[in-house]
Image (cartoon, rainbow, N blue to C red):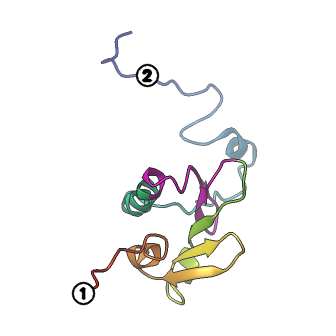
Amino acid sequence: MSDSEPIGLRPVSGLTGTMSSRQARTPGRKRHSDTAFNRNELNQIMGVYGRKVAAGEWRDYAIDSLRERAVFSIFRKASEVPLYRIEKRPQQARKQGAYSVIAATGLILKRGHDLANVLRVLDPRLKLVEV
């Protein structure tokens, strides 16, 4: 097989369509969709993350897609607790804003409707000061 040929995937026998084995065993249950970051949101987050990695401050990350929230965790080292968590909670979009940045202590540093504004707490831009 050459590098230019597409990889053909065959369905697993016994399963129909796109159902997983768990869904096939429990037909009466509804499938709940997980909350996730879209491409634009991930581009914004990875922009800040990339600048901090280049500066040597951060080294690892993890993305969790749960039923009611999506979490992007930022680590200094992989074996530690996350320094910051960027959370997306669509249920709070009308109230306090869907996005929040949470410190390792659980303190909510910033919350809002616009992800770019919320991420500014992690990567403040330098301002020109005239003397």
Residue at screen point 45% across, 72% down: 119
Left of 41 or right of it: where is 63?
right
Q: Secondary structure at mark 2?
A: loop
Q: Nearer the viewer, residue 24 or 131?
A: 131
Region of the chain picked out in magenta, as a range: 52-78
Q: Secondary structure at mark 1?
A: loop
Residue 130 is marked as 1
| Disc 1 packing (10 Å; few <14; some 14–19; many ≥20) | few
Left of 110 or right of it: where is 32?
right
Left of 131 or right of it: where is 2?
right
Rendered position, 114 above or below 88: below
Whether 61 is among the magenta residues is yes
* Residue under numbered circle 2: 8
Amino acid bearing label 2 = Gly
Residue at screen point 60% across, 27% down: 12
Q: Position of residue 27 (x, y in %)?
A: 71, 50
Left of 33 or right of it: where is 6?
left
Q: Residue furthest right?
A: 25
Q: Residue furthest front?
A: 131
Residue 34 is marked as none
Rendered position, 8 above or below 64: above
